[in-house]
Amino acid sequence: MVIGSGDAAIEEGMFLTKFAGKVIVSVMHEEGKMDCNEIAREEALSNPKMEFIWNTLPEEFRGDEEHLKSVALKNLKTGEILDVPVDTCFLFIGYVPNTEIFKGIIHMTPSGYVITNEKMETNIPGVFAAGDVRDKFLKQVATAVGDGAIAGYAAEKYLAESEVFENQIMDASLPGLVYIWNAVETVSRSLLPVIEELEEELKGRVKVTKVDIYKSAGIAGRLGITAVPSVALIKNGTLDTVLTEISRRKPSRLHFNY
Ligand SMILES: Cc1cc2nc3c(=O)[nH]c(=O)nc-3n(C[C@H](O)[C@H](O)[C@H](O)COP(=O)(O)OP(=O)(O)OC[C@H]3O[C@@H](n4cnc5c(N)ncnc54)[C@H](O)[C@@H]3O)c2cc1C
């Protein structure tokens, strides 16, 4: 038995006729009305191995611990219960993602699918989601595998960035200067030698970190900086100042007050 009349139910039901003597389809709609595409509908209705029981929904699955023996179908119009003996039953009446334990913590759609961005990031930094559990257009093996590759890569980047951010940028033992730049922007590139001169000059007194947002915007995001190029000054392990007006003046004339 197959429960449902959408594309998956009817297409999988027809596939099952290759192995089964008969495939009984329980459909909640009026006779002839199905949720699948028209081609599948025509094919299914003319397939002699497909038998339809209209206006019904499953009421109870009956059997013992080991085997299903029959499905009790309820006629939605008359309320009558029809006990249909079956060898097995496939449910195609929608899926419920197993996300209950994350409710109220991770952002989800009303039906419980996890909302992510294209990097598979959820609303919680460091928590990623991949596969059918995500809110997405096509739930298939190919897209689940793609999601997994992205989530794995993004998680690795997140951990590497956390390491730099916590142990280098926000380390309170020395003041820090972070140059936020973009390798594909001319202005950003032209200022790089100025920062490098400054790095040399401040050696041992100020930690200089260069963050290329073309590779990843993660650290800039953690500092809450969107302007590029810009210079962030870190004092006592906290963000002190963000300079966005940077020119190619000599490093000695950049008044960084250290
Ligand atoms: C009947 C049917 C036919 C399909 N046919 C195709 C097809 O022909 N081609 C195609 O590309 N796709 C098909 N799909 C879709 C495909 O199976 C899924 O898109 C794919 O399996 C998604 O992979 P996933 O890893 O995200 O989820 P799943 O494969 O569902 O894996 C999730 C895993 O997490 C486990 N799990 C759940 N909750 C917990 C928990 N709390 N703790 C620990 N583990 C947990 C589950 O047991 C499961 O092993 C079909 C799906 C169905 C139902």
Image: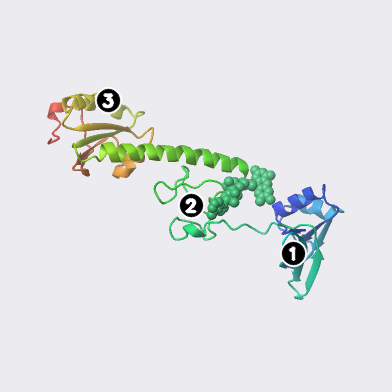
Callout 1 crowding tier (Cα within 10 Å): few <14, some 14–19, many ≥20? few
Quadrant holding the C terminus: top left
Callout 3 crowding tier (Cα within 10 Å): few <14, some 14–19, many ≥20? few
Look at 42% across and 51% down and name the residue there.
123
Q: Mark 2 = which residue?
A: 115
Kind of element beneath mark 3: helix
Kind of element beneath mark 1: loop
Please name which of the two marks, 3 or 1, marks the residue nearer to the observer: 1
Res. 133 in view: no
Q: Is residue 236 left or right of residue 6?
A: left
Q: Sequence order check: which comes first, mark 3 or mark 1?
A: 1
Q: Mark 1 = which residue?
A: 64
Kind of element beneath mark 2: loop
Q: Amino acid at mark 2?
A: Ile
Look at 50% across and 53% down and name the residue there.
114
Q: CA distance from mark 1 to mark 2?
A: 40 Å
Q: Position of residue 118 (x, y in %)?
A: 48, 43
Query: Which of the 4 quarters of the picture holds residue 26?
Result: bottom right
